[in-house]
Image: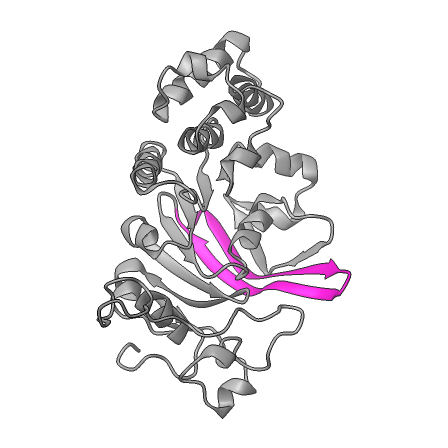
Amino acid sequence: MLLEVEDLSITFDTAKGALQATRQVSFKLAQGETLGIVGESGCGKSITNLAIMGLLPDTATVHAKKLHFDGADLQSLSESEFRKIRGDKIGMIFQDPMSALNPSFTVGFQIDETLKEHCPEMDKSARAARALELMNQVGIPAPAERLKNYAHELSGGMSQRVMIAMAIACKPKLLIADEPTTALDVTIQAQIMKLLKDLQKEYQMAMILVTHDLGVVAQNADRIQVMYAGEVVESAKSKELLAAPAHPYTDGLLSSLPGKKATAFRQPLPSIAGMVPDLRARPKGCQFNPRCLKAEDKCKTELPALTHEQDRQLRCFYPVEGTV
């Protein structure tokens, strides 16, 4: 198994007290597999991946029974040891490419810095050739000219392609794509996702795909993990989860998709009432109970355990009927 995460809990020290961003998050990822992570903003999706990358601030405390990547215990690594893995064996595409790229340096300089850090065997001419190859690989027209550009001279889609080029520069074993299609139009979204899948197949990379777009994970993920309030509430193979969601939260997310459930002409789509709870003042019991239409008294006092049945994980006392 390439990546193993078991009972990952992350707590931040804030001016208003401790904030537990994730609680006992567990999952595994094999070589070449794609895991889609979905959930509303503030559910712990990005924080989980930043912990894997070792990019959390000093105010964060990370505890896990297991946080292993490619045989290495990520919790025991020093910063210098982490730097050898980050950007080399693990690549990451950040949410906003326009802000993730350094505005003070050209695209070519930034790709060269990545190669210089992780591929010391390459001389300057070899790095230049690799940078040009990467720009071609991600489908950027006039690549030699684009290497001389700064971030502000690129469109959103072009910036995203540059971020992908930097992330795959060292042919990583794991690629973390955090909202890779956000703020891009539908045509560019499709191009970016096809590019990622083609690169994944070429390099046999594992991929973690974080997104709000259930359509994106439906088409690209082998497994889907649904997170709510920093917890995994359901996980299953994509086809099984999409065909028969067991957790009321998953069911609510899927029901809100246009065309998923019949609605009268020009009537509002179904939605989940309420908001994700304040993680500094979590509700008792199941974290979803204040918004759940199926909640009973037990849900308001007891936290359901994450159960494993066949190939599905589920955290719920009263799952959707007919699914489990």
| Residue 118 pos. (x, y %) | 56, 25
**Residue sticking out furthest to the right:** 15
Tell me how many marks there are: 0
**Which SS type dominates the magenta stretch?**
strand
| Residue 137 pos. (x, y %) | 35, 23
Q: Can the viewer see residue 304 in this picture?
A: no
As displayed, is residue 61 above or below residue 174? below
| Residue 178 pos. (x, y %) | 47, 46
Q: How is the image coloured?
A: one colour
Residue 4 lies in the magenta-colored region? yes
**Residue sticking out furthest to the front:** 266
**Residue sticking out furthest to the bottom:** 297
Report the magenta residues as a range: 1-30
As displayed, is residue 278 above or below residue 88? below
Point 59% across, 61% down: residue:
65
As displayed, is residue 83 above or below residue 50? above
In the foreground, 263 or 299: 263
Residue 50 lies in the magenta-colored region? no
Point 34% across, 71% down: residue:
270
In the foreground, 276 or 303: 276
In the foreground, 293 or 36: 293
In the image, taking residue 201 as reference, residue 226 lies left or right, namely right
**Residue sticking out furthest to the top:** 125
Q: Can the viewer see residue 193 in this picture?
A: yes
Quadrant of the snapshot with the C terminus: bottom left
| Residue 126 pos. (x, y %) | 48, 11
